[in-house]
């Protein structure tokens, strides 16, 4: 009989600070750059009741774990539930089962920070954030650990939301965080732009981007939805988390292809390729760069392994039994 560790959402929330996810996620993407297997999400949609079932996988031999999310969103509950199993990358034995929703913003914020660190100007001082929800906060917290920002401008359509965001982040960060009245006001003069929204259509005009700007887009992974317009994609050195997902669910890139301004050759490299030096990142101070972060099991497994290791160190979690197939199917 094998055992695995079950970690609750409340336990996970106490095991690691948001900034502690960044280094493991960076290491995992370097593994990907050296050839670690990973596949983009597969999503099954239901019309009645409306919802989606999603999953993605990665094997990280150096991290020592493999696995990935399976989650359901919508349906009758109108909510989402994240189950995250990880297995030992050598033996294949189960390591842990995580109730994974509470870690989601932290692992997503971490990969956003890794993308900024790899592609943004080293002296970036002005950050624009479009979006003011949980994911936007996580992106800002993580990104502030890789660049020394002086000023952050945040925009989202609801005035009270962006003002609350600015007030809360001003308490946490050294940078001055201000709410602004439009995405254009946020983007104007920004060195780094982060979009973390549920918008169906572009959230700013790409012609506004000044030479040298970096953009991280993480709010959409649907072929018919996009946060970035065609001008942004056309002008940018375009780096996704996984090349294989670009024509599946990277809506901003798909729209730009449909409009005939780019083709698949416009994909510069995966993030992992940049991190290991197989592809250049920013080649000129004038480059506009885009990191398209749609979500993969690379950061998910890395984050889960971090939490599992911490749980073992601290004696947290409940052991549950898993019957290996050799026993379970012996009848």
Image: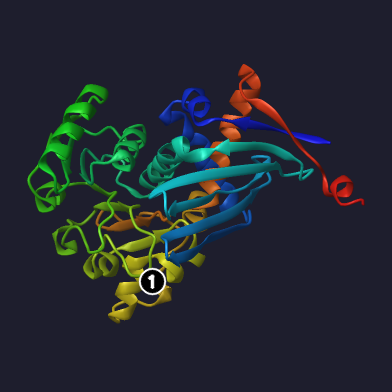
Q: Quadrant of the N terminus?
A: top right
Image location (x, y in percent) of residue 272: 51, 53
Can you say whether 202 is above or below 114 in the image?
Answer: below
* Label 1 Cα neighbours within 10 Å, binned few <14 / some 14-19 / many ≥20: some
User: For the point 23% across and 29% down, which residue is it?
Assistant: 169
Q: Residue 318, located in which quarter of the rendered image?
A: top right
Can you say whether 261 is above or below 85 in the image?
Answer: below
Name the residue that disc number 1 marks: 266
Residue 171 falls left or right of residue 315: left
User: For the point 79% across and 43% down, which residue is it?
Assistant: 91
Image location (x, y in percent) of residue 54: 51, 57
- Most extreme residue toward the top is 314
Q: Residue 309, located in which quarter of the rendered image?
A: top right
Can you say whether 257 is above or below 76 in the image?
Answer: below
Total labels drawn: 1
User: For the point 17% across and 28% down, which residue is it?
Assistant: 167
Label 1, secondary structure: give it.
Answer: helix
Frontmost residue, 329 versus 187 = 329
Is residue 328 in sight in this rendering? yes
Residue 123 falls left or right of residue 49: left
- Most extreme residue toward the bottom is 260
Image location (x, y in percent) of residue 243: 49, 64
Is residue 283 in sight in this rendering? no
- Most extreme residue toward the left is 181
Frontmost residue, 148 versus 277 = 148
């Amino acid at each position: 009989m094998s055992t695995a560790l079950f970690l609750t959402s409340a336990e996970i929330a106490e095991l690691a600070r948001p900034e502690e996810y960044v280094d493991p996620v960076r290491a995992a993407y370097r593994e990907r750059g050296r050839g670690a297997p990973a596949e983009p999400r597969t999503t099954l949609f239901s019309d009645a009741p409306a919802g989606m079932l999603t999953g993605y996988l990665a094997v990280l031999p150096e991290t020592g774990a493999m696995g990935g999310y399976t989650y359901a969103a919508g349906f009758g509950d109108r909510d989402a539930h994240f189950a995250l199993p990880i297995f030992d990358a050598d033996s294949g034995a189960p390591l842990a089962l995580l109730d994974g929703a509470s870690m989601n913003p932290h692992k997503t914020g971490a990969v956003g920070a890794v993308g900024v660190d790899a592609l943004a100007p080293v002296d970036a001082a002005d950050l624009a954030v479009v979006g003011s929800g949980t994911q936007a906060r996580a992106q800002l917290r993580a990104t502030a650990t890789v660049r020394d920002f002086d000023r952050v401008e945040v925009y989202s359509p609801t005035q009270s939301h962006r003002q609350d965001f600015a007030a809360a982040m001003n308490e946490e960060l050294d940078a001055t965080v201000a709410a602004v009245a439009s995405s254009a006001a946020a983007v104007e003069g920004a060195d780094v732009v982060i979009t973390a929204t549920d918008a169906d259509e572009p959230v700013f005009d790409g012609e506004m981007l000044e030479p040298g700007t970096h953009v991280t887009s993480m709010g959409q992974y649907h072929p018919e939805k996009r946060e970035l317009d065609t001008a942004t994609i056309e002008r940018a050195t375009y780096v996704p988390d996984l090349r294989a997902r670009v024509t599946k669910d990277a809506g901003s890139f798909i729209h730009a292809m449909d409009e005939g301004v780019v083709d698949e050759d416009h994909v510069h490299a995966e993030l992992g390729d940049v991190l290991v030096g197989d592809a250049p990142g920013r080649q000129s101070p004038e480059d506009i760069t885009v990191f398209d972060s749609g979500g993969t099991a690379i950061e998910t497994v890395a984050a889960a392994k971090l939490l599992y290791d911490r749980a073992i160190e601290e004696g947290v979690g409940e052991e549950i039994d898993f019957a290996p197939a050799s026993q379970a199917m012996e009848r």
